[in-house]
Amino acid sequence: MRRALTYATTVAALVTLAAGCDTGGSEQAAAPSAPATAPSSAGPAPTASPSPGTSTSPSPKPTAAPKPQKLKTGVKGARVVTLQQRLTDLGYWNGKADGTFGGQTQQAVYALQKAAGLNRDGVVGPKTQKALDQGVRPKAKSTSGRVIEINLKRQLLMLVDNGTISHVFNTSTGSMEHYEQNGATFLADTPSGKFRVSRQIDGWRHAPLGLLWRPKYFNGGIAVHGANSVPPYPASHGCARVSIAAMNWLWSNDKIPIDTRVWVY
């Protein structure tokens, strides 16, 4: 619960709905040695002389195959297209497969790494590639209807229909740090519970604690909203941040209409 440390319990209960992002409301062994042989009684065998023009230098060792290049922000090409298509097939939203590893692809890689329990660096190295190859996906808790599930431990936002996850997004929720506002101290948490989207703003909301892009409010001043910064760790005042591009897609496809259920756990 978002609570003012300087308020009484009753007042804190009243503040819960107002607290949040919008408190204003509206990552050669050596070869074995040849076995020794007993000396021959006939004496040593004569040493063959090399034929003229024959090289006596040892054969060059085979060159090891180069390791595949890690995929990260800025890389372009067919391997990136393959990555983007695989992410989409697994449900990790990353926009159009355009062959450029940009911010949207990085957000999807964050989400995959979170689901797989890997280091969240946004880079596709051997471990992340293994997760891709194995088809790692998170699991839903709801079983019926459209539900927006926000997993606080994994920092994932998921669109779930009748128990099946259709899309997974990187999200950043409450930092669990204290902050000051209007002379009072609050905790930047995202309360667990079951809620419904109750209101929305189709544009920028200049809230007292920062800018919210096209917010969908589900618990007082707490909303799912677009943000310019969506790190792979909790960093908000309580809202569930997604990328600007992701929020635009959610609006354009009417994925979170008013009255949509939101489960936070």
Image (cartoon, rainbow, N blue to C red):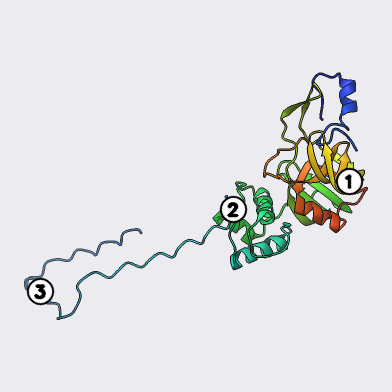
Bin the neighbour count of mark 1 within 10 Å (Cα to Cα): few under 14, some 14-19, many 20 and up.
some
Task: Name the residue nearer the viewer: 180 or 16.
Answer: 180
Mark 3–mark 1 Cα distance, whole angstroms, equals: 95 Å
Mark 2–mark 1 Cα distance, whole angstroms, equals: 34 Å
Residue at x 67%, y 56% (from the top left corner): 105
Residue hosting label 3: 45
Bin the neighbour count of mark 3 within 10 Å (Cα to Cα): few under 14, some 14-19, many 20 and up.
few
- Which element is circle 1 on? loop
Compared with 163, 52 (above or below) is: below
Task: Name the residue nearer the viewer: 257 or 229.
Answer: 229
Compared with 263, 10 (above or below) is: above
Residue hosting label 1: 201
Compared with 34, 125 (above or below) is: above
The amino acid at mark 2 is Val
Residue 160 percent coordinates (x, y): 82, 54
Residue at x 65%, y 53% (from the top left corner): 106
Foreground: disc 3 or disc 2: 2
Residue at x 74%, y 51% (from the top left corner): 169
Position of the C terminus by quadrant: top right
Position of the N terminus by quadrant: top right
Residue 91 percent coordinates (x, y): 74, 59
Foreground: disc 2 or disc 1: 1
Residue 49 percent coordinates (x, y): 12, 77
Task: Name the residue nearer the viewer: 131 or 225.
Answer: 225
225 with respect to 78 (left or right)? right
Residue 198 percent coordinates (x, y): 92, 43
Foreground: disc 3 or disc 1: 1
Residue hosting label 2: 123
Q: Is residue 139 visible?
A: no
